[in-house]
Amino acid sequence: MKKELAEQIQSDPDFQALIHHRTRTNWIMAITVIVVYFAFILMIAYYPQLLAIKISAGSEISVGIVAGFLIIVFAFLMTGLYVRRANATYDALTARIKETAQ
Amino acid sequence: MKNPMLILAGLAALITTLLFSTGALAADVVQKSINVPAVTMFVIFVALTLVVTYWAAKRTRTAKDFYAAGGNITGFQNGLALAGDYMSAASFLGIAALVYANGFDGLIYSIGFLVGWPIMLFLLAEKLRNLGKYTFADVASYRLAQIPVRTVAAIASLIVVSMYLVAQMVGAGKLIQVLFGLPYSYAVVIVGVLMVIYVTLGGMLATTWVQIIKAVLLLSGATFMALAVLYSFGFDFNAMFSKAVEISPKHEAIMAPGSLIHDPISAISLGLALMFGVAGLPHILMRFFTVTDAKEARKSVFVATGFIGYFYILTFIIGFGAIIMVSTNPAYLDAAHKLIGGNNMAAIHLSHAIGGNVFLGFISAVAFATILAVVSGLTLAGASAVSHDLYANVFRHGRVDEKTEMRVSRYATIALGILAIFLGIAFEKQNIAFMVGLAFAVAASANFPVLFLALYWKNLTTRGAVMGGLGGLITALVLVVLSQSVWVDVLGNATAIMPYKYPAIFSMPVAFILAWFFSITDHSVRAQAERDRFHAQFVRSETGIGAEGAVAH
């Protein structure tokens, strides 16, 4: 890409809006996943007995197993949320930026 | 290749003869009767994939076809193929085995393997697609000096690919020995020969479709197994877990974190390697260049995450099913009351407990097909590192025509096939449990930091990228050699020098700090020019303007 074109696109308000919005959301989502995962890992390392607690009296199912399943579902839902958001907002902005650039 | 059909027909005949003749022979020697349904289903799978390879070979004309399937794979197809790359025999049999032996601890690995995917989606996937052409080194070296950055990326890629290959080849050999009654070395040779056929003739298109077919088979088989386990408990999870706790020698302990993770440092270190390793695996990253655009790349991660997550839930149920239906059945135990063929056979024995010889045959054939598909993807990634990065861009400075580059990639594939067979045989008796973990650690410590900084940090220079990449690579390798899994288990020393099991908590920071330090102290003219090029790279990575398009056929 030519430097002039890059500079022109960078000064496009649509581009600035896209970057502002997307960078923020992406980092928030990434950090959320990282925090959830490492909270789980640190629980395993420091408080394994908490994960061993049963979810109710008379049940064999432990908190750890429920947490594990929920993290798997959570990871999937986060990717879904991102895709929905990107398809709805980012693609339209990107298309406008491309149009302006030509 | 002028006449792929003829070559294919010849090779198919050769393999079939090899399979049947040695099978009969081995039946006498190993005293293990040949599993007819398993071999039949495997031969059908191989025949089907060879037809796909023939179809793909006719469509593989240019380098873009060969490396990136012409950029025409849809997001959904790529998602299945990514999931297929990830659902290796190691993760199917290995995680089922971990759950079988330790219960909950198996889930720790599953979750770690999965959570890297959202991170890759949020931070890397679309940018990769917008900047790259065939390999992740294209992206890492986009605004940096081609020769040093590509060389480091290619070396790290080849190391990751080789480790992964060793794990898969040894797994294949052992699996086939037990299942098909074939000698170990024959199994390794069959896998090596078939993958060379897929990759050299059909390139990425064949590799992708072999992966998709296998992913569908594996998901179907695993779904059936999990449903059968749940069905026998009337779909009552609590009843299933209660029964497993009652039967397992560890009882209550299988429902909580156990012996797998000894100390917090190891726990965090494993977590880091699993989470960021995915974003450094060359055969995974390469698939982002096979889709039409960033939108499809995004969709493919969503699809892959869904299938992989679903698959791990299935393996968890399968592991518990094996505790209940396999561990007490003398038919699956040897004289020492251990599983015949080791814990890795837990899922395989369970398939027999559920559906008899025919279903055992199906799952065995699928497990073999899985290995075949995964090694093909690995080999293609390794061959691309050799032909596209090392040969075309480093050795020939990018001045090479497509025909020559493709020819080199085919030679590289054959060389890697031979290497894989050799490594598979050399490591037969070794304890290779650490291999996949090490591959993830190297990917997270050498490839991921360079790729991440190249995309996000304006001030990264060539010098920083090279020092960071090499530093992370060497630290990870050295620490693993000094740790329990190699220093004690392989080399036979009394105590490990490195007290922790996994290196990533040390090697990842080393990579980032070296990359940072050698970049900010780099005041050369070249470094300034590299920093100046960041803006153009940034605009392209965000918008896709100027990105590689798909080719029309």
Image (spheres, coloured by chain):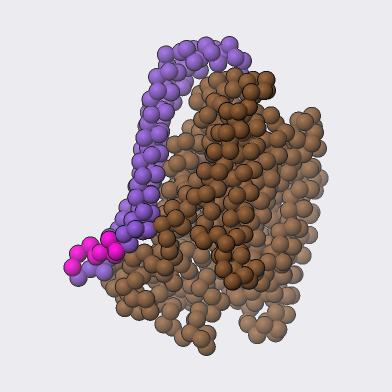
Chain colours: A purple, B brown
Q: Is residue A27 magenta?
A: no
Identify the residue shown where x is 44% and y is 53%. B268
- Closer to the camera in the image, B272 or B481: B481
Compared with B45, B251 (above or below) is below
Compare residues B386 and B550 and report the one nearer the observer: B386
Q: Does residue A53 belong to the magenta stretch? A: yes
Task: Spot the residue most to the bottom.
Answer: B335
Residue B305 vs residue B55: left or right?
left
Q: Quadrant of the C terminus of chain B?
A: top right
User: Residue at (67%, 82%) from the top-left corner?
Assistant: B30
Q: Is residue B289 visible?
A: no
Q: Quadrant of residue B424?
A: bottom right
Establish if B278 lies above or below B364.
above
Q: Position of residue B208 (x, y in %)?
A: 60, 47
Q: Give how far across and how far down residue B91 sits, in percent.
A: 51, 60
- Residue A88 picture location, percent across and down: 38, 28
Let me know if residue B246 appears in the view. Answer: yes
| Quadrant hosting residue B90 | bottom right
Q: Is residue B15 above or below residue B465?
A: below
| Tally of numbered discs | 0
For the residue pair B248 and B210, the one nearer the viewer reads as B248
Relative side of B241 to B191, left or right: left
Residues drawn in magenta: A49-57
Residue at image point 51% right, 14% down: A9
Which residue is located at x 52 percent, y 11 percent?
A: A8
* Place of residue B502 in the rendered image (x, y in percent of width and height, measured from the top left): 52, 57
Residue B170 sits in which quadrant?
Answer: bottom right
Q: Quadrant of the N terminus of chain B?
A: top right
